[in-house]
Amino acid sequence: MDKINVEVIVPAINKKYEFLLPIVMKVNVAKQLMTGIVCNLEGINFDNENLMLCYIDKGEEIGSNLSIEEAGIKDGSKLLMV
């Protein structure tokens, strides 16, 4: 299974994280998993329903029902979780 490395920036806590994601994973599943990891690491709680995963360079929300590959997320992509 092909995987890509992405950097996710979380401005609410002024931190960034690196994740290794399978290209066939749906964006909404990846967002839930990444949110859970960030919450556990930082000892905080985010409302997962209202969080958006965005392309940092375009400022657009990434479609939740797309796979990582379909969304055009590439190895080394920088994403924004807001």
Image (cartoon, rainbow, N blue to C red):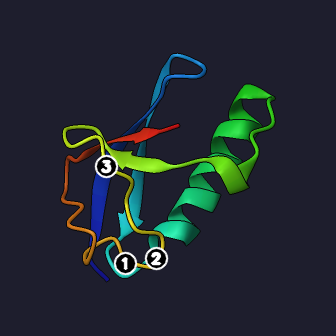
Instruction: Return the x and y of residue 32 as percentages of the image width and height.
Output: 63, 60
Is residue 32 toward the left or the right of residue 17 in the image? right
Give the residue drawn at x 37%, y 78%.
67
Q: Earlier in the sequence, mark 2 or mark 3?
A: 2
Mark 2 vs mark 3, CA separation in Å: 17 Å
The quarter holding residue 57 reads top left
Give the residue drawn at x 53%, y 37%.
82
Task: Tell me the kind of residue under disc 1.
Answer: Ser
User: Label 3's element?
Assistant: loop
For label 3, count other residues whose C-alpha is less than 10 Å away and answer few (under 14), some (14-19) or many (20+): few
Is residue 7 toward the left or the right of residue 15 in the image? left
Q: Are marks 1 and 3 in contact (CB under 8 Å)?
A: no
Q: Are marks 2 and 1 in contact (CB under 8 Å)?
A: yes
Up-down: is 13 above or below 46? above
Which label sits on residue 26? 2
Decide which of 28, 59 is in the foreground and name it. 59
Residue highlighted by disc 1: 67
User: Label 2's element?
Assistant: loop
